[in-house]
Image (cartoon, grey):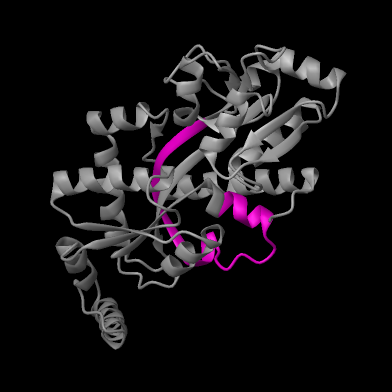
Amino acid sequence: MTRSATSRRDILKAAVAAGLVAQGVTPGTTMAQAASFPDKPIRVLVPFAPGGVVDVTARILTQKMTERLGWNFIVENRPGGNGFIAVTAAAKSAPDGYTLLAAHTGEFAGNPALFPNVPYDLDRDFLPITMISDTPMLLVANAQAPFNNVPELIAAARKEPNKYAFSSPGNGSINHLAGEWFASEAGVKLMHVPYKGGAPAVAAVAAGEVPLGVVAIPAVMPHVASGRVKVLGLTTARRTSYNNAWATATEAGVKVDASNWVGLFAPKGVPADIAAKLHAEVVRTLEAPDVKKRFADAGAETGGMSSAAFAQRIRSDAARYKDVVAKAGIKPD
């Protein structure tokens, strides 16, 4: 290398170092931060009350990470405002890895489709760490309903439009959007009946208040076991290991792929080394057999995809639901 080239290289290195110092960062700072991370409890914000799917998912993950690594977590529930309260608080938090967000399909794919002014933005405000779990939903019917599978339901609904109603945990819920997506793709007219939560929505099907429901696996299984509810099919494009006998709507020619995922997010600007460390340790935790079993028992599959792949999945879901909301004319409460 020539003396002039060496000189240019030294000048460039000095300029970069000076720029880092001006920002309060010395060479090796980010690597040192990642090496010592975490040296205090990590707060995980949850947009729902304790006991819901996002809360339970966050606690399964953090408890196992504490067991594996000795890391300390505080799961903080901030319900209300369609998830806006917790998500906005996470977005405004310091991007140092010590405040994370556990959220599901509704916050990042449903809300942007439903509300004209969402106070947060995936690309602007967050770095998706990874998907934690992914759970299919079920299209179910009361045991006395005159159909036993998706093709029979479609035939009956086409014969008598708007005769059949489906329940969901609420207006604008992912279950509601999945039901509307199914109806649109199947070319049928179904009425939507919202309930205040998943348990009441399933109970309504079991009691015969409504003939159909789009529900979560754990909530409906006791009613299936009692013989009061039957499973017509899955809302996802592929079958689930929870019960491989359940057919998908896609197999009946209805191109629907709606599931309820839960993911982990950090505020935008979190140091790359810390984000990489979080991703690596979350993935290792999700690979543990006992963790996989706990999720599988609830009908879920563990995630672990890359940050980029997760972000793309979210964008794809958001585009799908925006189209569903527009076609169905869904308005938020």
Q: Determine which quarter of the picture holds residue 169.
A: top right
Q: Residue at x 70, y 63 (%)?
A: 116
Residue 96 in sight from this viewpoint: yes
Residue 109 image position (x, y, % from top left): 58, 50
Q: Is residue 112 magenta?
A: yes
Residue 22 image position (x, y, % from top left): 30, 88
65 or 55: which is nearer to us? Answer: 55
Q: Residue at x 26, y 48 (%)?
A: 62
Q: Is residue 195 magenta?
A: no
Q: Quadrant of the C terminus?
A: bottom right
Residue 173 image position (x, y, % from top left): 60, 45
Residue 306 in sight from this viewpoint: no
Q: Residue at x 60, y 20 (%)?
A: 233
Relative height, residue 67 to residue 80 (above, below): above
Magenta range is 108-136
Relative height, residue 85 to residue 182 (above, below): below
Q: Quadrant of the N terminus?
A: bottom left
Q: Determine which quarter of the picture holds residue 39.
A: bottom left
| Picture mark count | 0
User: Quick check: 74 left or right of 69?
Assistant: right
User: Quick check: 213 left or right of 220?
Assistant: right
Residue 275 image position (x, y, % from top left): 32, 58
